[in-house]
Image (cartoon, helix red, strand yellow):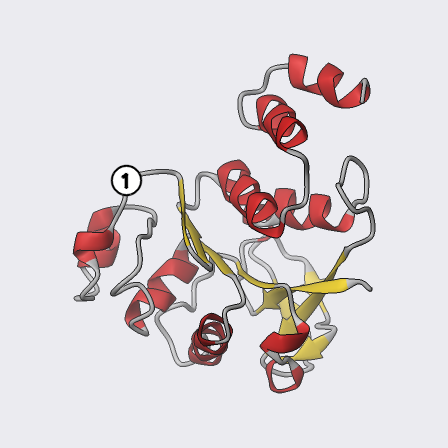
Amino acid sequence: MTETVHVALYDTFVDWEIGYAIDHVNDPEWQKAPGRYAVATVGATADPVTSTGGLRMLPDTTLDDVDPADSAMLILAGNNIWHTDQFAPFAAKARDFLDAGVPVAAICGATGGLALSGLLDHRAHTSNAAEFLDGLGYAGGTHYVDEPAVTDGDLITATGIAPVHFAREIFRRLDLYETDVLDAWFELYGLRDPAGFYKLANR
């Protein structure tokens, strides 16, 4: 049975921050269980949204119709609305996912939105910088980790300049690849070492 990885869509979502993750989740090549996952997009409404790169996209479904029990993960890209009421429904849905024990992955500005909603107060996390979150007056400063990406149970967070590290944590949490495949994937995309390509090609 195919499991759905939901990707949040909202105006100003940063398309390139989630590109590595969603491309490889949706691509069966090298996966432990090819076809286990499929990507679906979710918006606050069914109206089209536009990314920072100018891509106009129509959500597959809406937040009201997404039940964490029917999802494998919720992915939240960075955006320019994280501190506004427009992002609040996505932060609320992230809370529903975490309360249900279903993973949430947030990068860049989306981490700010989660911080404002209190979801980072008691979990290890990272973001664009400690100062970015501290300026919000959130209560989770002691749990900040200065790393490109951090996983604490069902929550994955990342700085906006580390989309490959973000993807690696997503793949690990979804158990997408065997360990040697994941290592080779990161060697290629994260370290930019062509040796990783040959390891993958020769599997």
Q: Residue furthest top?
A: 195
Q: Quadrant of the C terminus?
A: top right
Q: In percent of the image, x 54 and y 54: which residue is there? A: 14
Q: Is residue 109 left or right of residue 60?
A: left
Q: Is residue 176 above or below residue 133?
A: above
Q: Which residue is mark 1?
A: 146
Q: Is residue 167 above or below residue 202?
A: below
Amino acid type, callout 1: Asp
Q: Is residue 177 left or right of residue 160?
A: right
Q: Position of residue 102 (x, y in %)?
A: 54, 67
Q: Residue furthest bottom?
A: 64
- Count of numbered tags: 1
Q: Nearer the viewer, residue 56 or 188?
A: 188
> In the picture, residue 137 is in which quadrant?
bottom left
SS at circle 1: loop
Q: In percent of the image, x 63 and y 22: which residue is there? A: 188
Judge whether residue 194 can be spotted in this image: no
Q: In percent of the image, x 31 and y 59: which residue is there? A: 123
